Image (cartoon, coloured by chain):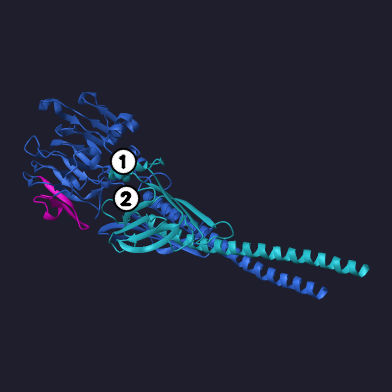
Amino acid sequence: MSDWLDVVGSIVIGGIVILIFANLNLSISVSASENLYSGIMQRGLTSAADLIEYDIYKIGYRNPGNNIEIADSNEIKFYCDIDNDGVSEEIHYFLGDAESFTETSNPNDFLLTREKDEEIPAASIPVVDFKLTYFDSLGQKIDYTLLSSQSERDKIKTLRIRMKCESADMIGDHYEAVEWEKTIRPKNI
Amino acid sequence: MSRFILIIVLGGYITYSITSMTQNKNVTQATENSVNSYSQTKARNIANSTIQMLMSKVADNESWRQTTPVTMQVFDGSAEYTVSDANFNGENLIKYSVTANVYGTTKQVTAYSGERSLFPGGIRGAITANNPVDTKGNITIDGRNHTVDGTLVNGSGSYSIWGSSTISQNGNSKYGGTYDGSDYAPTKPGDPNIISENQIWPGGFPDSPDKVMGGEDKGFSEGTLLDIANSGVNGSQYVTDPDDLNGPFSGVTYLEMSGSKEKDRTWQSMDITGSGILIIHNSSTNSIMKNINSGTFKGLIIVDDMVHIHADIIGAVVILTSSPSSGNCVGNGNGNVLYSSEAVKDAMKQVGLQTSSFNFGFGKNRLNVKYWFE
C-alpha cells in the first residue's frame, strides 16, 4: 500500500514541478520576446529621433527666404542648409495613412516620411503617433489654424515633437510601444 | 522517475539561463541606448553653452580670439574650442567652433556672429548722408579713427563722407579718412579712396534713427530710441521744443519738431556740448539742425537735415533727408567732424544699449549671431 502511495505522491509532485517549470518557461519566453521587440523598437526610435533632431535643429540655417513653409500638427516643411554646402535644402516630414501601410500586421501604424528636396523618400519611419506643437518667442502655443499664414509661421521659435512607435507584430495580447518627446529651439529662426 | 525529474529540472535551468542571458543583453542594449541619448544631449548642451560663453567673452572684448584649440572642462565633460575670424557666406564674421566630449560621445557645433556688433549699422563714415553734400569754409571732416578725446587711432577709421548722391568739396574744406587700413590725412582735395559718393543703400537708406542703429534685426524696433529718451536714463531727454533741452547732453537726446513752417522745424544756433546719441527727427524727415555754433559733442548725431557745422563733433553724423534745405551745405566755417568708433560705442553704453539690445550669453544678445550649425 505504501509503495502505491509513494508512486502516486511522486506523480503528483512531479506533475506540479513540471507545470511550474512549463509556466516559468512560458513566462520567460514571453518576457524575452517583449524585451527583444522593445529593444529593437527603442533602437529604431532612437535612430529616427536622431534624424529628426538633426533636421529640426537646423531650420533656417543659411536660408535666405522663408524658413517654414508648412507647419501643421503632423506635417512640417522647412528650409535649411542641411549639409552646410551653401545651398538651402527643402526638408518635408509628413504622415501617410494607416490603411495604405500594409507592411505590418499592426493596424495602427503608418509611415512618417521624410523628403529632402522632394526626393521620395529620404527616410520612412513606421509610427502610431506623430505630433508637432509650435510655440512663439514667449513660449506660447501657436494655434494650428493661424499657421496657414507665413507671418504666423515666422513667429515659430520652438517646436515640440512627440512620436510613438509600436511593434509590427502582436506580442502576447498587445503591441509593444515606445515613446519619444522633445522640445527643440532651433537657433537660426 | 527521479532521473526524469532531474532531466526536467536541468532542462528548465538551461532554458532559464539562456533566456536570462538574452534578456540581460537586451536590457544592456536598452541601457546603452539611453546612455548614448543622454550623452548626445549633454554633449550638445556643453557645446552650445561653451559657444555662448565664448560669445559673451567676445562681446566683452571684441578683439579677443583663440585660434589655437583650447580644452576646458564644462559640466561633466570637456569642450575644445577655437574663436577665429572667418569669411562665411560672403560676410566677414567671427567663427566659434566647439567640440564637446561626454563619456566618449562627441558633438561639434559651429556658430558665427557679426564683427562690429556694438556699432550701429547705419554709420558708413564720419558723415553718412542721404543727400548731396557740399562743404565750404574751413571745415574738416576726418574719417580716420579717433579716441573719444580726439587722439588719432591708426588704420581703423572709415570714409570721410559716405553719400547716396554727389559730394562737393569747396572752399578750404578738408577731407581725411581710412581706406583698406591706410590713413589719409585731411587734405583738399581729399583722396578719392576716402570719399564715397553716389552710393546705393541696399533696401533703401534708413529713414528713422532706429533703422540707423540697425533696425529690428539688431534689436531696434521702431520707437526703441524714443522710449529710451523718454525713460530719462543717464540724462536722456525727449522734447518737442528745443528751448526745453537741458545741456550738457547725455544719454539719448531726442528732439522732435513738427510744423508746416520751416522755422517751426528748425533748431538754430545751439551749443552742442555733451555726449551720447543726439537725435533731431520727425516722421516727415524734415526737421533741421542749423548753425551748430559752439561746443563739442562726443557720440552719434542722427539728424534729418544738418546745415553749417561750426563746432566739433567727435563720433559720427548721419543725415537722413534726401531733400536738404540749404543747398546741401553741411559746413562753411571752422567746424570739425572727427570719426570716433570709441565715442559712438561710449554713447551706446551710456544708455545700456550694448546690454539691453545686444547682450548675448544667458539671456540677452550682445552680438549679432548670424548662423548656428549644430
Instruction: For label 2, count other residues whose C-alpha is less than 10 Å away and answer few (under 14), some (14-19) or many (20+).
Output: some
| Residue at 15% from the left image edge and 47% from the top image edge | B161
Q: Residues within 10 Å of mark 1 (few under 14, many from 20)?
A: many
Write down the chain letter for disc 2: A
Q: Is residue A58 left or right of residue A14?
A: left
Q: Is residue B228 visible?
A: yes
- The amino acid marked with disc number 2 is Ile
Kindly identify which residue carries mark 1: B348
Q: Is residue B326 left or right of residue A65?
A: left
Q: Identify the element where label 2 is drawn.
A: strand
Q: Colour of chain A?
A: cyan
Q: Quadrant of the N terminus of chain A?
A: bottom right
Closest to the observer, B207 or A145 = A145
- Residue sitting at 41 percent across and 60 percent down? A101
Q: Please report the residue visible at 17 percent of the width from the left and 42 percent of the height from the top.
A: B336
Using the image, tell me which numbered label, if any, was put on residue A70: 2
Q: Mark 1, mark 2: which one is toward the viewer?
A: 2
Q: Quarter-wise, where is residue B90 in the image?
A: bottom left
Residue B188 magenta: yes
Most foreground residue, A145 or A172? A172
Q: Which chain is blue?
A: B
Q: Which stretch did the figure color magenta?
A: B173-199
Q: Residue at x 31, y 41 (%)?
A: B348
